[in-house]
Image (cartoon, rainbow, N blue to C red):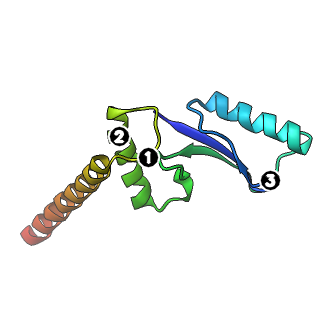
């Protein structure tokens, strides 16, 4: 399940987690109209977050991939909560490690045959 938050960097407030983009737009719209007269604050953030509340756009690509995998595995058990289960984080690390070893093995074999 996807999770979204709106953050106003001027007021230093963050909305509660919502599960639909339409609800995210409603949160941002309501805040801008009530606090800023409809104006868009500089550097406001709105977007998809992982189960730990981190914006995917701010994460390093490898960390974001791990977070996506851990989120997907955690959502298999309980799609509504936040936070990763330890086994989901370990499973995501195992998947990434296996994929890296497989790519390394294929590249080594390909270069060795040349």
Task: Report helix, strand or loop for mark 1.
Answer: loop
Residue under pointer 1:
83
Tell me whether the residue at label 2 lies in contact with that at label 1, contact meaning CB atoms closer than 8 angstroms. yes
Q: Earlier in the sequence, mark 2 or mark 1?
A: 2
Residue 106 drawn above or below residue 72: below
Residue 113 is situated, as x and y percent measured from the top left of the image, at 7, 68
Q: CA distance from mark 3 to mark 2?
A: 32 Å
What residue is rendered at 80% in x and 56% in y?
10
Taking the image as shown, residue 80 lies to the left or right of residue 101, namely right
Q: Position of residue 85 (x, y in %)?
A: 34, 46
Quadrant of the snapshot with the N terminus: top left
Left or right of 33 in this view: 75:
left
- Mark 1 surroundings within 10 Å by alpha-carbon count, few (fewer than 14), some (14 through 19), many (20 or more): few
Q: Secondary structure at mark 3?
A: loop
Q: Residue at x 80, y 53 (%)?
A: 11
Crowding at dot 2, Cα within 10 Å, few <14 / some 14-19 / many 20+, comes out as many
Spot occupied by residue 55 in the image (x, y as percentages of width and height): 56, 51
């Amino acid at each position: 399940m996807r999770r979204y938050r709106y953050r106003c960097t001027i007021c230093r407030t963050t909305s509660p987690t919502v599960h639909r983009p339409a609800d995210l737009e409603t949160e941002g719209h309501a805040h801008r109209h009530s606090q800023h007269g409809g104006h868009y604050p500089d550097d406001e953030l709105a977007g998809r977050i992982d189960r730990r509340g981190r914006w995917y756009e701010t994460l390093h690509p490898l960390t974001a991939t791990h977070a996506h995998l851990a989120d997907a595995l955690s959502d298999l058990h309980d799609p509504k909560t936040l936070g990763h289960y330890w086994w989901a984080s370990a499973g995501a690390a195992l998947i990434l490690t296996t994929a890296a070893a497989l790519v390394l093995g294929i590249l080594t074999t390909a270069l060795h045959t040349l």
